[in-house]
Amino acid sequence: RKVFREMAEQLEAASSTPSIQEATTSTTEAASVTSSTQEATGELYVSEAGQEADDGAGCAASLDPDLLCSICLDFLFEPLTLKCRHSFCRLCLLQASRLAPDGGACPQCRAEISFDPKTHALDQGLAAKIEEAVPPDELEARRAHTTATLEKMAAANSGPYPLFVMRGSERGFAPGATVSLHFFEPRYRLLARRAWEGDRRFLWAQSEPTAPGEAGLQPQAALLVVLESARFRAGGEADVRGRGEALVRLGRSYVEAGSGGLWLATVDESARPSSALPRASPPPGSADPSMLEGTAQRLRDAIARGAPAYNRGQARRCADIYLRAAREELRVSGARLVRDSLQEAVASAESLLREAEEADGGHARERKEKAAAWALRHAFDHVLTWIAYDSMPSGCTGCSVC
C-alpha cells in the first residue's frame, strides 16, 4: 500500500503522464518491497546458506506450484498423492495424520487418508519431476532432515505398547486377521489415541496379564495389532480397524497410573516366536469344520443386517438383530468356544438393554443401546476370527502369502 500511495503522489505531482521509464522504475520498486515482505514472512524459499538463487528467486519459488507441499511450503520430498489428488511430503503427511483429531484426513480438503504414510509407495511421477528440478545438494539436505526426524519419532515410540484386554477366547488370534473395534471405555479411548499418534500398534490379550513372578506360568501370548484406520468421534469414542501383525509373548506388564486402568506391556523378544505359536488341542465340544462354517455364515449375515441399522442411528434395532442371531447360535452350536464367547456377550447385552429401558434421558438410553450392540459385535468378531484361524493348515503363520 505504501508503494502504491507513493506512486499516486508521484502521479499527482507530475504535470504530464509519467514516462514508460518512470512507471517501470516504480513497478520494480513495488516488486522489491513485495519480495522483501515475502522473505520476512517465510513465504519465499531461501537456501541453507540464506542466499537466494542468482535469478532472484529461491528453488521453491521458481518451481511449478504442483511440485510444492502445502504443509512445509517447500518442494515435495518423497511425495505421496491421496485419492483426492492432493500431494504432500511423506514426512509432512505422516506428522499431520498422526495429529489429526479425526484420525487422518487430507490437510487441504479433509478427505480420508486411506493408507499409512509411513509405508505407502511414492508418487513416482512427481518424484522424477522433483529430481529434475531441484539441485542434488538440496535434495540431500532434505533427505538427511527427513531421516533424522523419522529416527526421533521412532525413538519416541519405542516404549511399552498399550494393551487391550477382552475375555472370551481360548485361542490366540492369527497374524493377518482383520481387527475391527469400537472403543468407548475411557482407558481404551486413550489406547486408541496413543496408538494412532504413535507407531500405530497395540497389543491385544485374551485376559489381563498374570502377576510377575508367579511360579509355573508361561509368558502370556498376545496379538500385536497394526492400525490401518481410525475414526475419533466428538465424544471421544473411537472406531479402529487394523490387522494382526504377529503373535508375541508379553514381557513386563503394568497398569499406568492415572489412566483409568490401561495396561502397558513390553514384548518379550527372547520368547517371540518366529512362526505361529503352537496350536492348542481342540477344546471339548468343538464342532466339525462344516458346522463352524455354518456358524460363520450366520454371524456374517447378522452383521450385514445389523451394521447398516447401526450406521443409520438405529442402535437398538442393530442390538436386537445381533441378540436374536446370538441366541439362535447358542441353541444350535456345539463348539465350546462359540458358546462361551456368545453367552458372555448375550448376558452383557441383555443387561445393557434393560438399563437402556430404565434410563431417564435419550442420550443415556442411546449410549446403553450402542454398548449392547458392540458387546455382541465384538463377540461375533472373536468367533469369526477364531474360525478363520482354526481353518488354517497346521503350522500356518497367517502371513497372507498363500
Image (tube, rainbow, N blue to C red):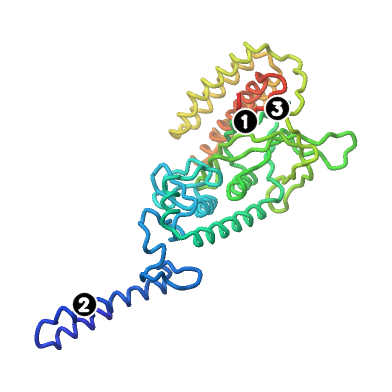
Proximity of marks 2 and 1: CB atoms separated by less than 8 Å? no
Distance from the alpha carbon under mark 3 to that under mark 2: 80 Å
Q: Secondary structure at mark 1?
A: loop
Q: Amino acid at mark 2?
A: Thr
Q: Which residue is mark 1?
A: 176
**Extreme residue toward the right, this view:** 215
Q: Amino acid at mark 3?
A: Ser
Q: Amino acid at mark 1?
A: Gly
- In percent of the image, x 65 and y 18: which residue is there? 391
- In percent of the image, x 36 and y 71: which residue is there? 56
In percent of width and height, residue 187 lies at 65, 46
Image quadrant assignment for residue 397: top right
Q: Secondary structure at mark 2?
A: helix
Q: Which residue is mark 3?
A: 169
In percent of width and height, residue 232 lies at 52, 45
Q: Callout 2 environment at 10 Å: few (<14), some (14 to 19), or many (20+)?
A: few
Relative to 397, is 239 above or below? below
Q: Which residue is mark 2?
A: 24
Task: Please identify, in this view, whether the residue under mark 3 or under mark 1 is nearer the observer.
Answer: 1
Q: Earlier in the sequence, mark 2 or mark 1?
A: 2
Q: Callout 3 environment at 10 Å: few (<14), some (14 to 19), or many (20+)?
A: some
- For the N terminus, the image quarter is bottom left
In percent of width and height, residue 362 lies at 49, 40
Q: Callout 1 environment at 10 Å: few (<14), some (14 to 19), or many (20+)?
A: some
